[in-house]
């Protein structure tokens, strides 16, 4: 029997505020353990919370970017449960009346535009962090708790179960991360916990409308982990069902080292969270004008930019995707493209050696890059020489044209002079010339290489090929 995969995601995004959600403690990553805490985020008796307005604005920005309905009335609730990283033994969240609902995110899978429904987006506070003695909860002897993270503002984004493959889940999450970066609401650093994902996965008989029993995979902290964990879990559930077994409703964790999911706890007897309205916080009531002003300040979305690069600048999907994924490179492209540089040449330059050098040393001033493009278009240097000039631009204050002049790298353009070099190479290799004329055409590359080596690469390859062709086709 074949099965359809059904996946829904719950994504936690840490908001990029300087202070926590309900107090004034700092949110900087990497501070010594338990140094960014106060009575409010530790839940000490008598401490009262106060909502961070910036966090609310960021939640609205994210919701608008995800095409959600912004609810002008929302409410905070207490979700009660006991866990070492939750100092108050309850979490302040929005369970019944979330701030955003009914949205969607569009993204491409193999050039096909897909849409995933966002059922809700709500605000909540972060828990603390468990530090395991061996780096993994699976085989640690003990765990310590760092409460610096407790109280950082989060948005939780919940999708409908309309994702049908592990690869689609990864591509969705990649696009969501990019969208949050473009909106400026989070740094989305998965290695620091700013973006985390839980996945619910079940199998159902192919074509059936009856969903199977879902299993939750917790705390997937990389795109690779998400895809691999879902692939493993789909295969595991398929084996169980094929053998006549039943899937247990449970939470599992992904063990990167062994490449498999491991059972954490059963969800069949899930605790009653005793959720009730937060007594220390009033409901959120958003003014329509305030929401409208936020909407007016939204930047271009990644998908909108992708389409603009393709339609207005004539770039390929591959080129456009690169520039959308690396906004700093895209900014360089847009600035130079507006000044009339060839769009395809510019994109190829940015995606090639420039990308490596810029990541290591920072971006060049766009005008210095424009100077390199100009001398390439003039034919002053070859494209191979362009790579050397680019390297020098990162080391030297000179312009591209000045570097070429100083190094003596100008292309040899005189056909008569270059023809003399070609004849010299062929005369020195007369035996190979006869073999070429006798049918050993693979020797062509040797002759081209010898000419280019003689002129130290300072020749137009097309002219070299034309001159060689003329000489080698002459009858001896």
Image: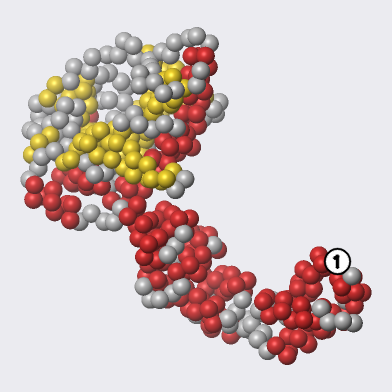
Residue under the point 14% across and 25% down: 45
- 55 left or right of 177? left
Q: In which quadrant of the rendered view does residue 175 lie?
A: top left
Query: Residue 211, how many percent across, how many down?
Result: 36, 20
Q: Nearer the viewer, residue 314 or 342?
A: 314
Tell which residue pokes out farthest to the right in this image. 431
- Residue carrying label 1: 440
The secondary element bearing badge 1 is classed as loop
Q: Nearer the viewer, residue 91 or 148?
A: 91
Query: Residue 333, how many percent across, how many down?
Result: 41, 66
Residue under the point 30% across and 14% down: 270
- Residue 222 in view here: no
4 to 373, vertically: above or below: above
Query: Residue 420, how many percent across, how many down?
Result: 78, 87
Check disc 1: other Cα within 10 Å, few if <14, some if 14-19, many if 20+. Answer: few
- Residue 182 in view here: yes
Query: Residue 340, how many percent across, how many down?
Result: 40, 76
- 406 left or right of 51? right
Q: In which quadrant of the rendered view does residue 265 lie?
A: top left
Query: How are the colours assigned in the image?
Result: secondary structure
Q: Nearer the viewer, residue 316 or 226?
A: 316
Residue under the point 53% across and 78% down: 377
Q: In which quadrant of the rendered view does residue 73 lie?
A: top left
**Viewport quadrant of the C terminus:** bottom right
Q: Nearer the viewer, residue 283 or 378?
A: 378
Residue under the point 76% across and 77% down: 469
128 to 112, vertically: above or below: above
């Amino acid at each position: 029997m074949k099965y359809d995969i059904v996946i829904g995601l719950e994504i936690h995004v840490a908001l990029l505020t300087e202070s926590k959600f309900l107090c004034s403690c700092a949110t900087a990553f990497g501070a010594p353990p338990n140094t960014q805490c106060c009575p409010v985020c530790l839940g000490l008796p008598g401490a009262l919370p106060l909502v961070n307005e910036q966090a609310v604005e960021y939640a609205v920005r994210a919701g608008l970017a995800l095409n959600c309905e912004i609810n002008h009335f929302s409410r905070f609730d207490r979700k009660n449960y006991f866990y070492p990283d939750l100092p108050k033994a309850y979490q302040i969240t929005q369970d019944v009346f979330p701030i955003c609902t009914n949205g969607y995110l569009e993204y491409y899978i193999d050039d096909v535009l897909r849409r995933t429904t966002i059922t809700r987006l709500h605000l909540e506070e972060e828990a603390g962090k468990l530090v395991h003695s061996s780096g993994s909860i699976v085989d640690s002897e003990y765990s310590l708790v760092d409460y610096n993270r407790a109280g950082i503002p989060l948005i939780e984004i919940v999708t409908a179960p309309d994702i049908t493959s592990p690869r689609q889940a990864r591509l969705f999450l990649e696009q969501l991360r990019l969208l949050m970066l473009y909106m400026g609401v989070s740094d989305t650093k998965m290695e620091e916990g700013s973006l985390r994902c839980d996945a619910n996965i079940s199998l159902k008989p192919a074509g059936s409308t009856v969903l199977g029993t879902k299993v939750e995979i917790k705390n997937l902290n990389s795109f690779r982990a998400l895809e691999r964990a879902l692939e493993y879990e789909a295969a595991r559930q398929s084996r169980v069902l094929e053998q006549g077994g039943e899937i247990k409703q449970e939470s599992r964790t992904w063990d990167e080292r062994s490449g498999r999911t491991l059972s954490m706890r059963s969800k069949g007897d899930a605790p009653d969270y005793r959720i009730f309205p937060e007594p220390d916080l009033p409901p959120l009531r958003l003014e329509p004008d305030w929401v409208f002003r936020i909407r007016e300040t939204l930047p271009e979305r990644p998908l909108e930019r992708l389409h603009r690069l393709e339609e207005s600048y004539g770039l390929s999907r591959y080129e456009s995707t690169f520039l959308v994924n690396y906004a700093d490179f895209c900014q360089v492209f847009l600035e130079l493209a507006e000044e009339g540089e060839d769009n395809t040449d510019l994109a190829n330059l940015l995606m090639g050696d420039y990308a490596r050098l810029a990541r290591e040393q920072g971006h060049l001033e766009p005008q210095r890059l424009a100077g390199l493009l100009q001398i390439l278009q003039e034919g002053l240097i070859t494209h191979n020489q362009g790579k050397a000039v680019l390297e020098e631009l990162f080391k030297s204050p000179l312009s591209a044209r000045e570097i070429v002049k100083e190094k003596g790298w100008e292309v040899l353009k005189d056909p008569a002079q270059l023809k003399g070099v070609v004849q010299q190479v062929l005369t020195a290799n007369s035996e190979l010339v006869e073999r070429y004329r006798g049918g050993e055409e693979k020797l062509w590359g040797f002759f081209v290489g010898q000419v280019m080596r003689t002129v130290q690469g300072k020749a137009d390859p097309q002219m070299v090929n034309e001159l060689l062709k003329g000489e080698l086709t002459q009858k001896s």
